[in-house]
Image (cartoon, rainbow, N blue to C red):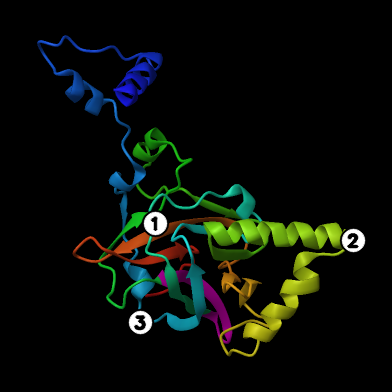
């Protein structure tokens, strides 16, 4: 009963009034006041080009997801990005890059994917976070999307729990080394060691498996973001049974399919 009173109070504050009991039962009125969840707002997009045979698939490691709450972000802005509203089963999942040759021997990352199942996606929906307003999502026009900003030329996948440790690790680094830089003093070496020798990577490395806590296998999978800085959408890939089989960042690279 206390819960019903609380919902009623919130509804009255929002300007709603209970209906005439002869026209609608009180519990039915309560149901009409419930907010639509993001995961119930399926905004479909065509991401079939992410499966193009002209793209080069490279597996770059596994992401550890202890909570199944995933953040896609610039690795230096994860403190301001919320995890997606949808969640997956906790576990370790492979991460793949899909790379296109934009010029002879010049490669760029077009898509980054976490794969939860070996079966392919047949349709995609926009991945959204809880701080995105339902009305804004409903008002998206064809070709429009919500995504995350990139200012360091990098994107990443990270679990919400790991992100707390990652932020703490960066803070501790700067507290101990206020004049240093986390990328140039630490990550640049890792990128170079992890991927620079791959034939599809640029000099210095285009992807990295950054270990946050080796005891718990907490990590951040990082990768170059297409042409660099910008604003990029992420999509859930579904199979015909409406099961989630992948999470895909589109780096908006135009390529000839």
Q: Position of residue 190 (x, y in %)?
A: 70, 79
130 with respect to 81 (left or right): left
Mark carried by residue 165: none
Residue at the far right in the pictured view: 179
Q: Nearer the viewer, residue 83 or 122?
A: 83
Residue bearing the label numbered 3? 53
Q: Quadrant of residue 257?
A: bottom left
Report the residue at 46% width, 40% height from top: 132
Q: Position of residue 238 (x, y in %)?
A: 28, 63
216 with respect to 249 (left or right): right
247 with respect to 220 (left or right): left
Whether residue 129 can be seen here: yes
Residue bearing the label numbered 2? 179
Foreground tag (3 vs 1): 1
Q: Which residues are magenta?
A: 102-114
Task: Report the magenta stretch's main SS.
Answer: strand
Separation of residues labelled 2 and 1 (CA atoms): 38 Å
Separation of residues labelled 3 and 1 (CA atoms): 29 Å
Q: Position of residue 113 (x, y in %)?
A: 44, 70
Q: Quadrant of the N terminus?
A: top left
Q: The residue tagged with tag 1: helix, strand or loop? A: loop
Q: Nearer the viewer, residue 87 or 47?
A: 87
Report the residue at 61% width, 55% height from top: 78
Is residue 198 depicted above or below 138 in this figure? below
Separation of residues labelled 3 and 2 (CA atoms): 46 Å
- Label 1 environment density (alpha carbons within 10 Å; few <14, some 14–19, many ≥20): few
Counting residues from the N terminus, which is met first, the one under dot 3 or under dot 2?
3
Residue bearing the label numbered 1? 87
Q: The residue tagged with tag 3: helix, strand or loop? A: loop
């Amino acid at each position: 009963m206390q819960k019903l009173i609380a919902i009623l109070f919130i509804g009255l504050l929002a300007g709603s009034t209970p209906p005439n009991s002869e026209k609608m039962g009180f519990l039915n009125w309560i149901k009409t006041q419930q907010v639509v969840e993001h995961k119930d707002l399926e905004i479909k997009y065509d991401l079939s080009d992410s499966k193009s045979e002209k793209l080069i698939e490279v597996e770059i490691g596994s992401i550890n997801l202890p909570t199944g709450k995933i953040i896609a972000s610039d690795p230096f802005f994860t403190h301001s990005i919320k995890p997606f509203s949808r969640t997956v089963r906790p576990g370790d999942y492979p991460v793949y890059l899909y790379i296109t040759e934009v010029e002879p021997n010049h490669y760029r990352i077009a898509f980054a994917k976490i794969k939860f199942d070996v079966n392919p996606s047949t349709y995609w929906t926009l991945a959204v976070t809880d701080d995105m307003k339902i009305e804004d999502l409903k008002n998206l026009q064809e070709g429009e999307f919500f995504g995350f900003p990139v200012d360091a030329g990098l994107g990443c996948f990270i679990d919400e729990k790991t992100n707390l440790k990652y932020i703490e690790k960066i803070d501790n680094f700067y507290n101990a080394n206020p004049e240093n830089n986390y990328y140039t003093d630490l990550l640049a070496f890792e990128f170079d060691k992890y991927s620079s020798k791959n034939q599809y990577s640029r000099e210095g490395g285009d992807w990295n498996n950054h270990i946050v806590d080796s005891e718990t296998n907490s990590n951040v999978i990082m990768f170059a973001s297409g042409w660099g800085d910008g604003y990029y959408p992420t999509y859930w890939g579904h199979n015909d049974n409406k099961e989630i089989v992948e999470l895909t960042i589109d780096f908006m690279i135009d390529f000839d399919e």
